[in-house]
Amino acid sequence: MSQKVLLNAKEVNIILHRLACQLIEKHNDFSNTVLIGLQPRGVFLANRLAKILKEDYKVKNVQLGYLDITFYRDDFRRGEKPLEANSTKINFLVEDKDIVFIDDVLHTGRSIRAALTAIQSFGRPNEIELLTLIDRRFSRHLPIQPNYRGRQVDVINNEKVKVNWKENDNEDSVYLIEK
Amino acid sequence: MSELSVNHLLGIKYLNKKDIQLIFETADHFKEVINRPIKKVPSLRDITIANLFFENSTRTKLSFELAEKRLSADVINFSSAQSSVKKGETLIDTVNNILSMKVDMVVMRHPNPGAGVFLSKHVKASIINAGDGAHEHPTQALLDSYSIREKLGEVGGKKVVIVGDILHSRVALSNIFALQLQGAEVMVCGPKTLLPKYINKLGVKVETNLIKALNWCDVANMLRVQNERMDISYFPSTREYTQQFGVNKELLDSLNKEITIMHPGPINRGVEITSDVADSKQAIILDQVQNGVAIRMAAIYLLASKIKQ
C-alpha cells in the first residue's frame, strides 16, 4: 500500500479560508442559511468552516447541525460490514432555510442522495447546496455535483482519498492511498 | 460497528452484554428519528415482516407494528382468533404457509413456552419472540432496562425489585436475565404462592415484605396480576393482595428516598398500583411505552442487517 500527499496542512488551511469566503459571497450574513455536516467525517470539515466563519470573518449567525444518513443509505444488507449509525443533531428548523451540506469527499454521490432524502424528515428547505473538500470527479454514480469544492482530483478505482483532521487524526492532510 | 451475536431474538438468555449495548445504542438513534416531524426511515423497504399473534396483545402488537412501519418494512398481521389454527392447523404449517409468501422475519407471540425456539429450528426466517407463555419477553425486558438507563444514567449497580406475580410472568424472567447481564442487583417480591419454587437459583434476592423491598431498591417494577393464567386461587382476595403488595402514594412518600416506578402494562389501576402513583412523576410507565418503539426498531434493524440478499 503506497500513499501520496495531495494536500498538506498549509494547503488545507488556505482552501478552508477560500471556501469560507465563497460561502460569505453567496450567503452574506447567514441569517437564512444553515450548515449541515454529514456524519461521520463531514462534521470535522463543517466544524472547521463554522469556526473560521465565526472567528476570522466575524459572521454571527452561523447555525451548524450534523446529519446522519445511515438509515437512508441504499446499501443496507449489501455490504460485508454492518452500517454504523451516528448521531443527528439539528436543533433548528430547516423549513424555508438555505442549507449547505458539507462532506469531506464527494465520490459516487450516493451519500448525498441519502442526505437529500434524510433532510426531508426535518422539513422543506428553500435550497440545498453542497460543499466538499475533495471532489473525486469521474467516479459519480448519480448526477450530483458540488457547488463549492476544495480540490478536484482524478482517482482510479484501486485508489482511495483519505482526509485527516487535526482534532481526530493529529494532522490536517489529504492523502491518495493505493489499496 | 459490531453486530448481534444471534440471528433470532428468542430470549435474553441467548444475548450477551455487547448485544444489549448495541441494541441500546441503535435505539438511541431511532429515538431521535421518532421525535422528528417525519418519523420514518427507508432502511427496511425490501423486508417483509409477519406479526403472528397466537395470543391476545394490544401494546406489544401495536408497538411492533409501528416500529416495522417506521422502518418502511412491509407488514402482514395474523391473529389466531380469526385463523385456520382454530381448524387444527399446526404451528409449522401455519408459519410455512405465511413464509411461502416471501416473508423475511416473523414476530411471534405464543401461549406455549419455547414456541419461538421451536420455530427457529424449522423455518428459515428470522424470529423475534414477542412473548412465549410464562417464559420470556425479551423486547419488554430490553425496553425496561433502556428506560432505567435513561432515567438513572446506567443499569449497572442499580437495585431493582420486581413485585407481584413472578410465577406467571415472562416479563419477570427476561428482566432478571437482562438486569443481571448489565450488572444490576435484582430482588423479587410477592406472595409466596406467586414465587416460583426455584427462583433462588437465578441469583436473585427474595422478599415477601413489600416495605422492606421498596426501602432496598432504586427501581420497583410492578407486575400485573395475571388472572387469566391462574388456574387456582393464589391469594385470598384482590383486596388482600392490594393491601400487601399494592403501591400507593402514601407508601411511596413514607420511604426515605425517591424510587422509580415501572409497570409493563396493562395496569390494573387500584390493584398493583394506585392511579396517583401511576400518574406521578416517579412513574416512567409512558416512557417505557415510547422507548418500546425505539427498542423494537433497533432489534428489527439489527436482525434485518443479518438477512443477506
Image (spheres, rainbow, N blue to C red):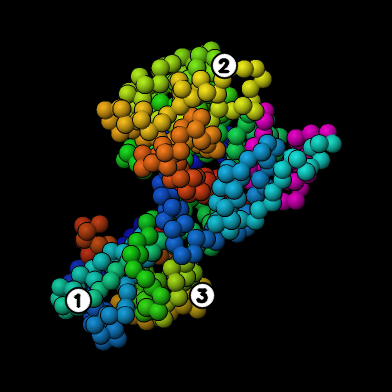
Identity of the amino acid at label 2? Answer: Pro
Judging from the image, mark 3 belongs to the subunit labelled A
Q: Residue at x 41, y 61 (%)?
A: A68
Q: Real-space Cα distance between discs 3 and 1? A: 35 Å
Q: Residue at x 56, y 17 (%)?
A: B235
Identity of the amino acid at label 3? Answer: Leu
Labelled pair 3, 1 in contact (Cβ < 8 Å): no
The residue tagged 2 is B236
**Residue B76's x, y, as percent?**
69, 51
Q: Real-space Cα distance between discs 1 and 2? A: 71 Å
The residue tagged 3 is A142
Identity of the amino acid at label 1? Answer: Lys
Is residue A91 rendered to the left or right of residue B60? Answer: left
Return the disc, 3 or 1, that comes first in the chain's sequence: 1
Q: Residue at x 55, y 27 (%)?
A: B225
Judging from the image, mark 1 belongs to the subunit labelled A
Q: Is residue A167 above or below residue B3?
A: below
The residue tagged 1 is A60
Magenta span: B88-112
Front residue of this view, candidates B233 and B139: B233
